[in-house]
Each structure stands twice: as structure tokens, then as C-alpha cells.
């Protein structure tokens, strides 16, 4: 399972879900699902998000082992 | 995604199908089809007061649903000019491909519907062959399959779009 820090970083960068969605070229619903962990993004979207937050991709997305 | 009619589109289809099922059942079970040896045929309906009124009420209901549906489509198209619903298109209007999440959700929903039909169609076909089922019940069975198709699609889509 892929976990992410999108919600935390979005708050730090003072962005709404809609604003982040516009910047990375997806719908707000995608950001909602991403933050809830119910959707695993494509590599391209993950890279776009990393670029937006100016951070390496692995610092935003990490793999969590299944229990 | 609130007010996006592409999400509720299957519900409208299900409503229309349910009304059609009632109409098919009443009209079909009241029809008498006679074929003459010398050629020609005669189709008669004997509805009676209760059945006649029920057909009238459901026809009116169907008409009202149709008008409300067209009005809702117009409203949707004004609100979402980039995701217009076309009533003349052959593409199912409930498909959503706005971005990668929606493409994935649509894929999952259509996959479930495909799995349902690959199982249900042969089962229904066997029943039609093995049992003396009338044409009315055959039509109702097909409508029922169609209703389930939209139900599966809607419940799958809803899981994702209800997360707002």
C-alpha cells in the first residue's frame, strides 16, 4: 500500500485541494481520494505533485507493508 | 462532483427501467395474440379498470420522468460545459474520463458490469431454453439484467465520488 504526505504538505504550502488539483492537472476528487489513501496515483501524477512541493518523490510517497 | 449528472445518470436509467418493467408486465399479461390459418393475426388487450388505470398512471409517470430527465440534462450541460451529456451519442453517458482517477473508477465499474454479464447472460439463456417462459417474462428478465447493470455501475462509482 502507498501512503502519502499530500495533506500535510498541502497545508504547509497553504493550498486548497482545488488549487493543488489545478496545479497538477487533475480533479479535486482525485486529491480527496489520494489524501484518504483510497487511490494510488500514477507515477506521472506522483512526479507532478513532488515537483509542485519541490521535494523528492520518495519523501512524499512511501510504501507501507501489508499487515 | 455534486450535481454532476453523470454520477446519478444510472439512477435515472434504473427508474425508467423499473417503470418499463411494470408497463411490460401489465400490458403483456393482458394481451392476446391470435394467428389465423388463412393468414393475418389479431392482437387484443383486455385491461379492465384497475389495470387500465395502472397503465395510465405509469405512462404518465414515465412521461414526467422523461421531462424531468431532459430538464436535468439541460441543467447539467449548462453547469458543466466541458462534460456535456449528449442524448444522441452512442457512448454511455455515465462514463467519466476527466482525469486518471475517473478513468480508473470507470474501468473498475465497467469491469464489474462485464463480469456480471459474462455470468448472467448464459444463466438467463439456459433458463429461457429449459423453461417454458413467456415473451413477457423474457423481456422483464432482460430489463432486470439492465437494471442490475446500472446498479453495479452506480454503487462502484458512488464509492469514490461520495468521498467529498
Image (tube, coloured by chain):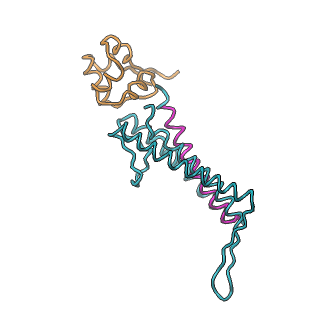
Chain colours: A orange, B cyan
Q: Is residue B26 left or right of residue A22?
A: right
Q: Magenta segment, which residues?
A: B133-160
Relative to B46, is B54 above or below? above
Q: Is residue B143 magenta?
A: yes
- Quarter in which the N terminus of chain B is drawn: top left
Residue that extends furthest to the top in the rendered view of this protein: A12
User: Of residues A56 and B17, which is closer to you in this image?
Assistant: B17
User: Of residues B15 and B155, which is closer to you in this image?
Assistant: B15
Relative to A25, is B65 above or below? below
**In x, y percent, where is residue A17?**
36, 21
Relative to A33, is B25 above or below? below
Residue that extends furthest to the bottom in the rendered view of this protein: B38
Q: How many marks?
A: 0
Q: Is residue B107 left or right of residue B21?
A: left
Q: Is residue B155 magenta?
A: yes
Q: Main secondary structure of the magenta part?
A: helix
Image quadrant of residue B21?
Answer: bottom right
Determine the residue positioned at 39% across, 34% down.
Answer: B101
Image quadrant of residue A44?
Answer: top left
Amino acid at each position: 500500500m502507498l501512503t502519502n504526505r499530500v495533506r500535510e504538505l498541502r497545508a504547509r504550502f497553504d493550498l486548497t485541494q482545488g488549487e493543488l488539483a489545478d496545479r497538477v492537472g487533475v480533479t479535486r476528487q482525485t486529491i480527496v481520494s489520494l489524501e484518504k489513501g483510497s487511490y494510488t496515483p500514477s507515477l506521472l501524477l506522483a512526479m507532478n505533485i513532488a515537483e509542485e512541493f519541490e521535494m523528492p518523490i520518495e519523501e512524499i510517497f512511501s510504501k507501507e507493508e501489508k499487515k | 462532483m455534486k450535481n454532476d449528472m453523470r454520477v446519478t445518470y444510472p439512477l435515472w436509467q434504473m427508474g425508467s427501467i423499473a417503470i418499463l418493467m411494470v408497463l411490460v408486465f401489465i400490458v403483456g399479461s393482458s394481451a392476446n395474440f391470435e394467428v389465423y390459418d388463412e393468414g393475418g393475426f389479431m392482437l387484443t388487450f383486455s385491461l379492465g379498470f384497475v389495470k387500465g388505470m395502472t397503465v395510465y398512471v405509469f405512462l404518465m409517470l414515465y412521461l414526467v420522468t422523461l421531462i424531468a430527465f431532459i430538464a436535468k440534462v439541460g441543467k447539467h450541460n449548462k453547469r458543466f460545459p466541458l462534460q456535456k451529456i449528449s442524448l444522441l451519442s452512442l457512448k454511455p453517458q455515465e462514463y467519466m474520463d476527466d482525469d486518471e482517477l475517473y478513468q480508473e473508477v470507470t474501468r473498475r465499474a465497467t469491469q464489474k458490469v462485464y463480469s456480471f454479464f459474462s455470468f448472467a447472460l448464459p444463466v438467463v439463456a439456459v433458463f429461457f431454453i429449459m423453461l417454458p417462459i413467456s415473451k413477457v417474462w423474457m423481456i422483464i428478465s432482460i430489463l432486470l439484467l439492465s437494471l442490475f447493470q446500472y446498479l453495479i455501475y452506480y454503487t462502484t462509482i458512488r464509492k469514490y465520488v461520495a468521498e467529498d
